[in-house]
Image (tube, rainbow, N blue to C red):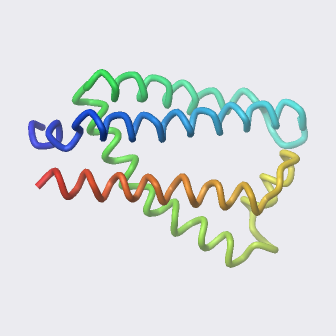
Amino acid sequence: MMRLRHAFDPPMRRAVASLWLAGLALTLWGAVLAYQHPDAGPWFVFFIPGIGLAVLTVATIRGAPWAFAIDTVVLGGQVIGVIGVLFELSHFDTSEKAAQVRALGADPLLGLLTNLIFSAIGVALFARIALRWR
């Protein structure tokens, strides 16, 4: 765990926390859109990941070892996010994710590209953690 703590120096903590805050903003935006478009699904389900991201942001900034472990796993999982978004973009016309975003009243291409950028930043942060962790 000590080596993982070394990977999360203050600049890394701020970078990861910033990504989680961006995720929180996107989650809250999704909740507002879902509230405005009730046929898109329940808006309150967006608050579960929002609460998790808020807690993780604070814990990461404060240097909680359990948060570093969760950060590392979630950031590593963003590789799957990038692959998934690229798949969705390659099948855009029949994409279920694009249909969900469209049901929320947002531009599906913008939603998928936002997701791609978010996940790519997560992968880059994970790569930096992995390099510093060894």
Relative to 10, is 30 on the left or the right? right
Classify residue 117 by image quadrant. bottom right
Q: Nearer the viewer, residue 8 or 44?
A: 8
Q: Nearer the viewer, residue 8 or 100?
A: 8
Relative to 77, is 12 on the left or the right? left
Relative to 125, is 86 on the left or the right? right
Residue drawn at x 35%, y 23% is 59
Image coords of residue 133 (percent x, y) = 15, 51
Image coords of residue 129 (percent x, y) = 25, 51
Image coords of residue 10 (percent x, y) = 26, 33
Image coords of residue 46 (percent x, y) = 67, 33
Residue drawn at x 67%, y 69% is 88
Classify residue 56 by image quadrant. top left
- The C terminus lies in which quarter of the figure? bottom left
Classify residue 131 by image quadrant. bottom left
Residue drawn at x 73%, y 35% is 29
Q: Image height check: is 85 above or below 101?
A: below
